[in-house]
C-alpha cells in the first residue's frame, strides 16, 4: 500500500511544524512521481507554501532552463501535468529543467542553491529484502541538508 517516509533535517528538527515550506519537487513522467506531486501540492495548499517542480533529464542539450518551454517531450508532459494539478488547487508552481546531469546531483544542487527546506520525492519501491527506492533517492537522502519526504504508492 501507500507509504510515506519523512527524514526531518535542518530547521524541521528544531521546529517540527513550520508555518511554511519551500518545497522542491523533482518529477519524472511516472505515476509515482505524480503521487509525490499530489502530496506536495496538498502540503503547499495547507501551509501556503512555494513549490519548485524540477525535471532532470540525462539527455544532452541545454543544461539549465529556468522556465519550461512546454514545447513537447516527456519533461513538458510531466511539468504541464504538475502545473495543471497545482493550478486546480490554487497553487503556483515554478518549473525548471536540467539536462545532461545525474539526477541526484542536479536535485542536490538545486536544493542547496535555492535554499529549499523540503524535498518531496515520488518513489517506487524496488524488489528485495531491504527497503530501497533506487539510486537517485538513496543519493539524495544520503547527502541533502534539508528535510526529505519520500512518497511511495
Image (tube, grey):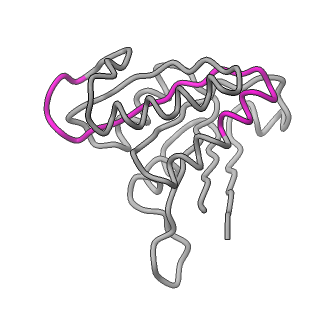
Find residue 43 and report its horizontal and vertical position in percent. Answer: 74, 35
Quadrant location of the C terminus in the rendered image:
bottom right
- Write the start and end of the magenta stretch as one range: 40-63
Placement of 96 over or under 107, stated as above or below? above
- What residue lies at 56% left-to-right and 21% top-to-bottom? 93
Residue 43 or 132: which is nearer the viewer? 43
Q: Find out whether residue 64 is within the magenta segment.
A: no
Placement of 150 over or under 81, stated as above or below? below
Residue 20 vs residue 73: left or right? right
- What residue lies at 61% left-to-right and 17% top-to-bottom? 92
Placement of 117 over or under 5, stated as above or below? above
Q: Find out whether residue 51 is within the magenta segment.
A: yes
- What residue lies at 37% left-to-right and 35% top-to-bottom? 77
Quadrant location of the N terminus in the rendered image:
bottom right
Placement of 7 over or under 79, stated as above or below? below
Residue 34 or 128: which is nearer the viewer? 34
Find residue 107 and report its horizontal and vertical position in percent. Answer: 42, 36
Residue 111 or 124: which is nearer the viewer? 124
Residue 103 or 151: which is nearer the viewer? 151
Find residue 134 and report its horizontal and vertical position in percent. Answer: 42, 62
Q: How many marks?
A: 0
Residue that protrudes farthest toward the bottom in the picture? 129
Quarter residue 21 falls in: top right
- What residue lies at 55% left-to-right and 27% top-to-bottom? 84
Amino acid at each position: 500500500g501507500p507509504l510515506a517516509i519523512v527524514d526531518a533535517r535542518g530547521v524541521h528538527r528544531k521546529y517540527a511544524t513550520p508555518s511554511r515550506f519551500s518545497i522542491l519537487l523533482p518529477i519524472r513522467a511516472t505515476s509515482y512521481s505524480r503521487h509525490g506531486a499530489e502530496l506536495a501540492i496538498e502540503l503547499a495548499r495547507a501551509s501556503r507554501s512555494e513549490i519548485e517542480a524540477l525535471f532532470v533529464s540525462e539527455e544532452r542539450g541545454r543544461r539549465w532552463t529556468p522556465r519550461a518551454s512546454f514545447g513537447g517531450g516527456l519533461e513538458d508532459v510531466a511539468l504541464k501535468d504538475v502545473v495543471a494539478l497545482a493550478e486546480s488547487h490554487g497553487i503556483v508552481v515554478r518549473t525548471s529543467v536540467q539536462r545532461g546531469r545525474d539526477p541526484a546531483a542536479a536535485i542536490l544542487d538545486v536544493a542547496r542553491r535555492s535554499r529549499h527546506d523540503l524535498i518531496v520525492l515520488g518513489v517506487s519501491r524496488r524488489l528485495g529484502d531491504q527497503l530501497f527506492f533506487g539510486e537517485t533517492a538513496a543519493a539524495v537522502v544520503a547527502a541533502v541538508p534539508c528535510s526529505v519526504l519520500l512518497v511511495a504508492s
